[in-house]
Amino acid sequence: MHSYLGIHEDELKEMGGVFTAREIAHQPSVWRKTKTLFLQHLPEITSFLDNVFSLQDLNIILTGAGTSAFIGDVLQGPMQKLTGKTVQAVATTDMVTHPRLYLKEEQPTLLISFARSGNSPESIKSVQLAEQLCRNIYHFIITCNMEGNLAKNATGDNTFVFLLPPESDDKSLAMTSSFTSMLLSGLFLASYNDVENLSKEFDKLIQYAAVIFDRYLDDLRKVALLDFDRAVFLGSGLFQGIARESHLKLQELSDGKVICKYDTFLGFRHGPKAVINNKTLLAFLFSNDSYVRLYEKDLVNDINNGEKGIFRIGVMEDEIDVDVDLKIILNRDKKVEPIRECMLTVVSVIPAQVIGFFKSMYLGLKPDSPSESGTITRVVRGVRLYSYEEETTYSSTEAV
């Protein structure tokens, strides 16, 4: 019998948490399979992207719904830096209501869609709107579900579908391995011309995940036992997207019994800091950039001079001289070169996933389906879509 997150599989099944525990624990394995698949398809990916990236004034839009949208928040900066192209992160939930703010008729556009199931109505509608409103539109779809509408309806020379390993298609309500695997795929895509060098750092990523599961699992379980009903996750730059995903994981898995917020280290001072009380969990997701850390350390010191909350966690690649209750240090070997900042984001979300799982369990919920009232579901329900009428529309055949 297997164990996941230190709990036997039969016990996990009984408590309604086997999918969530397994999906959190098997992320390194799914990452390995994701990397293998990407390298296998690299020639076709390169051919498609070389053609698209040769277009003048190309606009790249990273999109998805919910957790899938947060992937774009993380990737926007690194992808813009690596490709030299204009990159926007736009949730499908924004694009559906205001398509003309983002989709430009004459500007060549690459819409990169992230989707676990590929069945979210807003994701499907965003692709349709892009086809309708853009003369030169290209699609790169990253999805976990080959049977999803997004993958099944993808046709034409202007579309490429990268299908992740089946294990990435999380069965639990809260996305975990699907999020990190799609994020990793997006990083590979952004650096497709240099993917061999990026993949050299891959082993460190696996090692860092092992550090969390092997050394800090019990610490994180004890954190979940604390009597907190608020949590704040802070991250700078691209880590703000990880903070956003972290806040959603804990809030979803606790069925809203823990109200969560996210912000940047610098932004938190500008009003949001008022949320801290003696039942607030604070999680600092540190960058490994020494310049960025100067600001992050200042904020931690500032908090420590006032209301500190019930507990403070710091997630860091190497040890930082800050006063927190728990330091999750991923690399204690000072001879090892730091991983790229963008790669560090992939593993930095795991502590929140683990805390969310144990908090759900201790609250008497079923982690695989924590929403007792059915308020939130694995694939969103109740979205009514409307036609977007304009005088001019373009067919996808004009995009190739």
Image: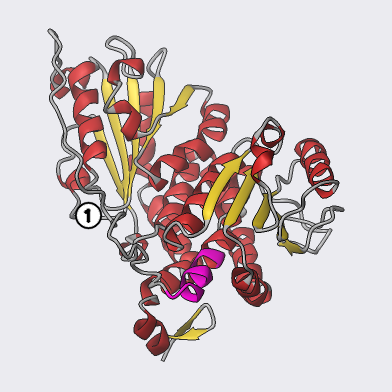
Question: How was this image coloured?
Answer: secondary structure
* Quarter of the C terminus within the rendering: top left
Please name the residue shown 58% across and 54% down the image. 230
Q: Which residue carries the number 1 mark?
A: 146
- 290 or 386: nearer the eye? 386
Q: Is residue 358 above or below residue 57?
A: below
Mark 1 neighbour class, 10 Å CA radius: few under 14, some 14 to 19, many 20 or more: some
Q: Quadrant of residue 293?
A: top right
Compared across the picture, whether 78 is left or right of 115 comes to right
- Residue 363 forms part of the magenta stretch: yes
Compared across the picture, whether 288 is left or right of 183 comes to right
Please name the residue shown 46% across and 42% down the image. 70
Q: Quadrant of residue 374?
A: bottom left
The image shows a total of numbered marks equal to 1
Please name the residue shown 32% across and 34% down the image. 93
- On the image, the x and y values in percent for residue 94 come to 34, 29
Magenta stretch prevailing secondary structure:
helix
Q: Is residue 335 above or below residue 83?
A: below
- On the image, the x and y values in percent for residue 19 come to 37, 72
Q: Is residue 382 above or below residue 365?
A: above
- On the image, the x and y values in percent for residue 136 come to 26, 17
Query: Could you tell me which secondary element the residue under label 1 belongs to?
Result: loop
- Residue 360 forms part of the magenta stretch: yes
Image: magenta residue range? 355-364
Compared across the picture, whether 395 is left or right of 146 comes to left
Residue 48, visible in the rendered structure: no
* Quarter of the N terminus within the rendering: bottom left
- On the image, the x and y values in percent for residue 50 come to 39, 29
